[in-house]
Image (tube, helix red, strand yellow):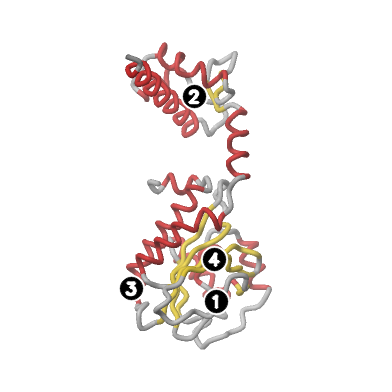
Amino acid sequence: MTAPAHRNQSSSLRRALTVLEYVRDHAGTGRGMSLTRIADDLGINKSTVLRLATPLMEADLLVRDRETGWFRLGHGTLRLGQAYLSSLDMRTVAAEPLRLLQQAVGETCHLVVYEPPDVVYIDKVENETNVRMASRVGSRVPAYRTAVGKAILAWLGEEAFRIVVAAGMPPVTEHTCTDPERLRAELGRVRRLGYAIDDRENECEVRCVAAPVFDHTDQAIGALSVSGLTTRMTPARVREVGPMVVRAGLEISHVLGSSRARDNGH
């Protein structure tokens, strides 16, 4: 006989969370959102909005301005966010998406973090039947000559670009980009495509495709990549794999709290 009450409570909770999410997504100016706007946009009456908002305000998840009556997020959301972020570790968050990506493409997958002017490999998943890549967890590589490095740099500012260029761009293969302006142009292409390519720039006969990982501030803090011999990672295969890497990067970014993932449908 208690099932209907449970269902009603569950429905009320979902609707209250809808109100909270609406305020989160639409109150970016700091002023908040009016009761009328919330009710109209969500298709519920004002008295229902007030009823749903009451426990949220009691939990400090919402606050209501005494003068305007507008709603905005409360400091309780900050405490929740801080607790959530303190429990995150990018390597742990990325482990499953990285494993699934490796299974889907059948090539070696990497996860890196950015430590200017280098990237540092923090995880690697490889197909045991393929030729092993020279990369190893813990190793550092200059960002300018790797797909993962370019995937990160494309979303950072001019200062990050200058730091990388100032550290030097010596060639390690005949395909390494050593011209700062060529690198700048390539970073523009990365922003348009969503992913970066290393075409034998860091290792002879190896192509890589990489996408950035964003944190809760929407800062590019790392990247993941797929690497393979050029005989398998042909230009056509790179175009197939690129969107897959982007989706995996957005999945990780979503868990890390990035709004970029929400904007892309995650």
**Separation (CA) of disc 1 from disc 4:** 10 Å
| Residue receiving disc 4 | 123
Res 126 → quadrant: bottom left
Residue 33: numbered disc: 2
N-terminal label among 1 and 4:
4
Drawn side of residue 259 relative to residue 1, left or right: right
Q: Nearer the viewer, residue 137 or 207?
A: 137
The image quadrant where one finds the N terminus is top left
- Residue 96 to residue 15: above or below: below
N-terminal label among 3 and 1:
1
- Kindly report which numbered mark, 4 or 2, lies closer to the viewer in this rendering: 4
Q: Secondary structure at mark 1?
A: loop
**Separation (CA) of disc 3 from disc 2:** 47 Å
- Residue 71 to residue 209: above or below: above
**Separation (CA) of disc 1 from disc 2:** 50 Å
- Kindly report which numbered mark, 3 or 2, lies closer to the viewer in this rendering: 3
Residue at the image position 51 percent from the left and 80 percent from the top: 201
Residue 237: numbered disc: 3
| Residue receiving disc 1 | 135
- In the displayed orientation, state which residue is furthest to the bottom: 174
Q: Residues within 10 Å of mark 3 (few under 14, many from 20)?
A: few
